[in-house]
Amino acid sequence: MRREIVLFATIISSVRSLSQQKNTDNNNNNNNIAYGSLLRSTLISASADNNLNRTTKAADGAQAGWQYWCDPCSVGFNKLKSYKEHLAGKRHKAVIAESEALWEAYLKSGPTFYDPSIAQIDATRAWSLDLFIDGLQARSRSSIKHVLVSGVPSGQIDPSLRLCDLPPSKRAALWRYLYTSGIPCLSFMVAALPQHYVRVKELLESVETFMHVERLMKRSSKHGQKATKISHIYDIGCGHGLVGMLCAASFPHITVHAIDRVPRDSFQAQREAFVSSGCSLSNLSFEAGDLSILRNRIESSSDGHHFGEHSLMLCVHGCKSLTHDSIEMAIRQNWAWLSLPCCLQADNHISEKTSLKVTDQMRFTMLCGAIVAKYEPEIVTTIDSRITGRGIVIASPGKGT
């Protein structure tokens, strides 16, 4: 029990600081795009303008607090020397070199994203979550509405906020994020999707979760062996299914099994939008049911222990005991697994004698700590808390068998 308590405290402290750390690391590291995008490091495109080398004193928003600001790269510095080194560096030069191609692509992006009032810098500036969320409607449980403020690591994007609700400059920034994500057809799929299905929070959360899946698949196991080459992904309790679809689009050699009790309308709409955008998703299937589908197949297999070798169990915001049950199944089968917990049940993770008289967020964090203590994953990280309040990512690459 002492070990679990120490882990609880460690997880709570880490989760509180991770998002803030992503926003401040850039002060002393010129190789990071500011404000915590989880995109891979090669995605550095942004735009040029006629005054790139000017020294900018920022007065508000994400620029506040920085003495010098590079607008194309969305990055700030407090020392002139660091700023000049950035301007002379390979990253900044690559940003400038790719800006024209990005602008040409934006001009052809279609009415969902394109707006004639948009300046080139708005569509090609390096992605910054801090810049993007500034002024967006925040989640609120009362009738009093408020907005998010850049530089303030509190509050979350309103889950009901849709792409069509965004002003043109925000739509252009989101287009850049999607277009440079490296996920085939993503920006075109979103443009083709009926707009009542395009909720900003769900979209960002799904893409960021996929980035963690991608990293997991490349990670070595704790035994020092090369990570298993994944051939099947089981997206259990898939809901709208976008994370699984992003996996299917990005890894056509992997079979993705989306499993949920009933197919949502949004699942079919997204699949059709991918197909109309040129991405067939022929490696994606949907099955109506729950975890018992896999359990029955394992039990009926002639060699149940090796059923589905080289598989990954994906559970994104699974309800109640699904997080716990899916992790245990993955461990028994030596599969890789990734979980983004949501509504956890205390009796699955701590003693029934323990009474948690704490806030909802503290309770959630402690239960995630209990999962870490019990299953000893190799990876515990977060999605920015301004995107989701349930953003703790827990994962393991399996045993590399």
Image: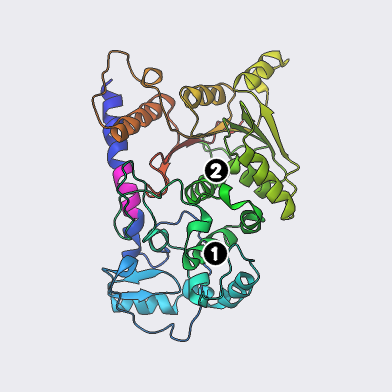
Q: Of the residues shown, which amino acid type is indicated by label 1?
A: Arg
Mark 2 crowdedness (10 Å alpha carbons): few <14, some 14-19, many ≥20: many
Camera-nearest residue between 191 and 36? 191
66 to the left or right of 254: left
184 to the left or right of 374: right
Q: Are discs 1 and 2 less than 8 Å apart at CB? A: no
* Outermost residue to the left: 357
**Residue 218: image location, x then y, percent:** 57, 45
Residue found 41% across the figure and 44% down from its top: 388
Residue found 38% across the figure and 77% down from its top: 85
59 to the left or right of 70: left
Q: Which mark is residue 176?
A: 1
Q: Is residue 359 magenta?
A: no
Q: Which mark is residue 368?
A: none
Camera-nearest residue between 104 and 301? 104
Q: Which residue is mark 2?
A: 213
Q: Is residue 28 visible?
A: no
Q: Looking at the image, is mark 1 or mark 2 nearer the viewer?
A: 1
Camera-nearest residue between 272 and 98? 272
Quadrant in the picture for the N terminus: top left
**Residue 234: image location, x then y, percent:** 62, 32
Q: Of the residues shown, which amino acid type is indicated by label 2?
A: Val
